Image (cartoon, rainbow, N blue to C red):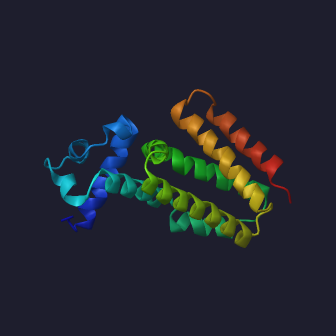
Amino acid sequence: MARRNDERRAALVDAAIEVLAKEGARGLTFRAVDTEAAVPAGTASNYFANRDDLLTQAGARVYERLQPDEATIARQRASTPDRETYAQLMRELIGRISSFRTGYLALLELRLEATRRPDLRALLTERVRADVDANVAYHEESGLPGDATAVRLLYLAFNWLIVEQLTLPGVFSEAERDQLVEAAVERIVTP
């Protein structure tokens, strides 16, 4: 029977994210999670039915932790809906993801693992689709320039920029990254 202590479960899922980022999906074991979380051996196995359950919850948790806080959302909504605001929004997004490097690396591991695990693939597909749809809806409500296609193109472009930054950080300097963000918004987003 799975345990119900929500704080402990969240700490174990966070530990699983760290293990995924450091060791990859093959290194994700209950023992590795227990060690990372600094809890007694056997704790993780009391909270998760199996490894698939742990993988699925780790995937959901990464997205929870990547959400902007209420202050960021309020500031964005109060900004002038123009290209510069759009570029600032993209810089903030890349910064938020970059500050949770292990989460994004874990998510990349989960995406690879999802090619072999249909339940995980279904969860991640649903989550990514919902994320893209939420971004499009936010964009349309905000009055920012551009259309749904621009939002999707920027999503795809910046995902790869983030992969480059987190896996091969020497490819682009921070200044080059900021210039690329500006150029992408300028070229993709039409008034």
Q: Quadrant of residue 28?
A: top left
Q: For the C terminus, which image quadrant?
A: bottom right
Q: Quadrant of residue 172?
A: top right
Give the left or right position of residue 185, taking residue 51 as reference. right
Which x, y percent locates residue 149?
76, 58
Residue at (37, 52) in percent of width and height: 55
Which x, y percent locates residue 116?
45, 45
Q: Residue furthest bottom?
A: 141
Which x, y percent locates residue 190?
85, 56
Residue at (58, 64) in percent of width and height: 130
Q: Nearer the viewer, residue 191 or 35?
A: 35
Q: Residue furthest right?
A: 191
Q: Nearer the viewer, residue 127 or 11?
A: 127
Q: Nearer the viewer, residue 53 or 164?
A: 53
Which x, y percent locates residue 156?
67, 48
Q: Quadrant of residue 162?
A: top right
Residue at (33, 57) in percent of width and height: 53
| Vertical comparison of 101 with 44: above or below | above
Q: For the N terminus, which image quadrant?
A: bottom left
Residue at (57, 39) in percent of width and height: 163
Give the left or right position of residue 39, taking residue 73 as reference. left
Q: Nearer the viewer, residue 37 or 60?
A: 60
| Vertical comparison of 159 with 11: above or below | above
User: So how many labels did they put on this image?
Assistant: 0
Give the left or right position of residue 44, taking residue 26 as reference. left
